[in-house]
Every structure is written in structure tokens, then in C-alpha cells.
Image: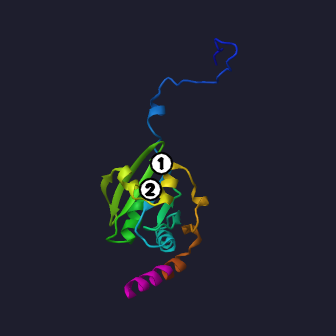
């Protein structure tokens, strides 16, 4: 701690590290990871994630449900994207992560990681819920219609997905 040169200024408890690279590079685990899907409702997405044994909070939006991942450690977001994109064959999804102020977006389809996308383009037509989550203006708990995957048993998940598939075939 240093003594201010001007006695009227308050003392600052400031520590400058020897290696400032930790200040410049984001941490290895993301602070937020969201799967942006085209799945019509939060409940079917939560059911699919329950079957894949993923802990998520499904958020309904007008373009498709979002899966806000609870496990952000290591390669858990990539494993989640692979699992969900395998369950919904032929339907691409986007894994959007935030590390510090750095956003990254990757397309996934059929369990395979695809192109890296420009986050600005992904957010350009994004629903308000996604923008608010990514910018930290809101939390999952503050959003309405959220369905946690942990509240859906495997039996209920199978019934939900079967019912949803039946309704989709009738259209």
C-alpha cells in the first residue's frame, strides 16, 4: 500500500501483479454458456437435456428455446452442445459462451462442431432474452417460463418428447 502524495486523497489498496497476462486473458472456464436452439418450447428442450443427463435451464423465446448450462467446467459446454445436437438430428444449434468480455459462438449439428461464427452476427437477430443474459442485464432466475431439466424425470421426458413428436407429425 502506498501513501498518497496529496494528503487529501484517500489511500488506495492497489496491488499490481508482476505478470499482467492474467488481467488480459480471460479465464479458461466461461462465465456463461448458452445453447441457442430452434426447438419450439422450453419443456421439450429441458426434456431432451434431461435424457442427455445435462443440467440446464431452458428459456423460451420467439425463435426457439435457449439452454443455459449450469456446468461450465472444462469441456462441459462442448459436450452439452454435442449431446443436444445429436438428440435433435438435422437441426443446427449455436453454442454461445462468454469469458470476461469475450464472446464466442460455434455452430453444432449432429454432434459435430462446425463453423466459428461472429458473435455480433449471432446477436444481431437474437431475442431480447439472449441479449440480456449475455450482457449480464438479467439472470435466468429473473426470466419467465424457465424450465429446469433437473425437474424432469426420464419417464416424463420420454412422454413429453413423444407427445411433441406426435404433434409435429400432425401439422
Q: Quadrant of residue 11?
A: top right
Residue 40 % position (x, y): 44, 73
Q: Mark 2 or mark 1: which comes first in sequence?
A: 1
Q: CA distance from mark 2 to mark 1?
A: 9 Å
Magenta span covers which residues? Answer: 160-171
Circle 2 residues within 10 Å: few <14, some 14–19, many ≥20: many
Q: Is residue 144 magenta?
A: no
Per the rendering, the mark at residue 113 is: none
Whether pointer 2 and pointer 1 mark residues with C-beta atoms closer than 8 Å, the reply is: yes
Q: Is residue 169 magenta?
A: yes
Q: Nearer the viewer, residue 110 or 139?
A: 139
Quadrant containing the C terminus is bottom left
| Picture residue at 48% right of the left edge, 66% below the top | 61
Q: Secondary structure at mark 1?
A: loop
Q: Nearer the viewer, residue 112 or 93?
A: 93
| Picture residue at 48% right of the left edge, 68% below the top | 49
Residue 105 % position (x, y): 38, 53
Q: Is residue 68 above or below residue 153?
A: above
- The residue labelled by disc 1 is 30
- The residue labelled by disc 2 is 77
Amino acid at each position: 500500500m502506498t501513501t498518497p502524495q496529496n494528503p487529501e486523497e484517500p489511500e488506495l489498496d492497489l496491488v499490481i501483479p508482476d505478470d499482467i497476462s492474467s488481467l488480459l486473458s480471460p479465464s479458461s472456464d466461461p462465465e456463461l454458456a448458452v445453447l441457442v436452439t430452434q426447438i419450439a418450447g422450453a419443456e421439450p428442450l429441458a426434456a431432451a437435456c434431461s435424457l442427455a443427463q445435462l443440467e440446464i435451464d431452458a428459456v423460451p423465446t420467439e425463435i426457439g428455446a435457449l439452454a443455459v448450462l449450469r456446468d461450465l467446467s472444462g469441456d462441459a459446454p462442448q459436450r452439452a452442445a454435442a449431446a443436444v445436437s445429436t438428440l435433435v438430428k438435422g437441426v443446427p444449434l449455436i453454442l454461445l459462451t462468454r469469458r470476461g468480455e469475450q464472446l464466442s459462438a460455434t455452430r453444432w449439428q449432429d454432434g459435430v462442431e462446425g463453423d466459428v461464427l461472429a458473435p455480433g452476427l449471432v446477436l444481431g437477430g437474437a431475442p431480447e432474452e439472449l441479449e440480456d443474459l449475455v450482457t449480464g442485464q438479467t439472470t435466468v432466475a429473473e426470466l419467465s417460463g424457465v424450465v429446469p431439466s433437473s425437474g424432469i424425470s426420464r419417464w416424463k421426458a420420454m412422454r413429453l418428447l413423444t407427445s411433441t413428436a406426435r404433434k409435429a407429425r400432425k401439422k
